[in-house]
Amino acid sequence: MDDTQALECTQALPADWDEDDDNNSGEKRIVAWLEIEGVRHEIFEGETKIGRDQATCGIVLQNKVLSKEHALFDIEGETHTLADLGSMNKTRIGKMVLKPKVRYALHGEEQIRFGDIRAKYIINEKWLFHYVDYGLLC
């Protein structure tokens, strides 16, 4: 009896695989940046909120147009999404107003507005290539 199972996605890892690249340190990877007025704010794998609340938001801006928890970036693998969290002053991607609690796909280089705060979403290409190079994306 054969106890092995074929996997849908398999790929040999390169011989130069570095344990440090595996990120066993527990440190979150910077997968993107939100650029606001020339300042880049880091966005990590997983969820990152933007708002005024220092206790719950990864990107904190003390601007009254932002809600305490205004919007949520969620990155899983190569999928980047943005959701408005029911903010009073809305979130926009380009000219499109986001419906509250609905996740919208981001592909990089989007112009985003949180109320009247203008931002640009920039994907960390080094992180994306890491996933592709090591076969972590199927």
Image: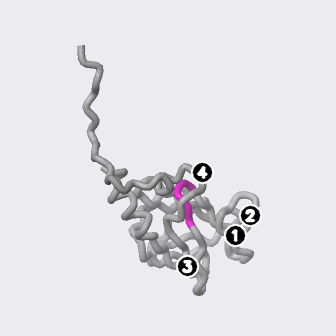
Of residues 57 and 100, the one nearer the viewer is 57
Q: Are marks 2 and 1 in contact (CB under 8 Å)?
A: yes
State the mark number for residue 75: none
Q: Which residues are magenta?
A: 43-47
Which residue is at the far front?
Answer: 15
Residue that numbered label 2 is attached to: 53
Horizontal and vertical percent position of residue 66: 68, 72
Q: Quadrant of residue 86?
A: bottom right
- Among the two numbered marks 3 and 4 on one chain, the one whose residue lies closer to the N terminus: 4
Task: Decide: few, some or many residues near mark 2? Use Cα within 10 Å; few <14, some 14-19, many ≥20.
Answer: some
Disc number lying in front (4 or 2): 4
Q: On screen, 87 above or below 3? A: below
- Among the two numbered marks 2 and 3 on one chain, the one whose residue lies closer to the N terminus: 3
Q: Are marks 1 and 4 in contact (CB under 8 Å)?
A: no
**Residue found 41% across the figure and 70% down from its top:** 125
Majority SS type along the magenta span: strand
* Callout 4 amino acid: Gly
Left or right, 54 with respect to 20, comes to: right
State the mark number for residue 35: 3
Task: Decide: few, some or many residues near mark 1? Use Cα within 10 Å; few <14, some 14-19, many ≥20.
Answer: some
Left or right, 47 with respect to 19, comes to: right
Residue that numbered label 1 is attached to: 60
Disc number lying in front (2 or 3): 3
* Callout 1 amino acid: Val
Q: CA distance from mark 1 to mark 4?
A: 23 Å
Task: Decide: few, some or many residues near mark 4? Use Cα within 10 Å; few <14, some 14-19, many ≥20.
Answer: few
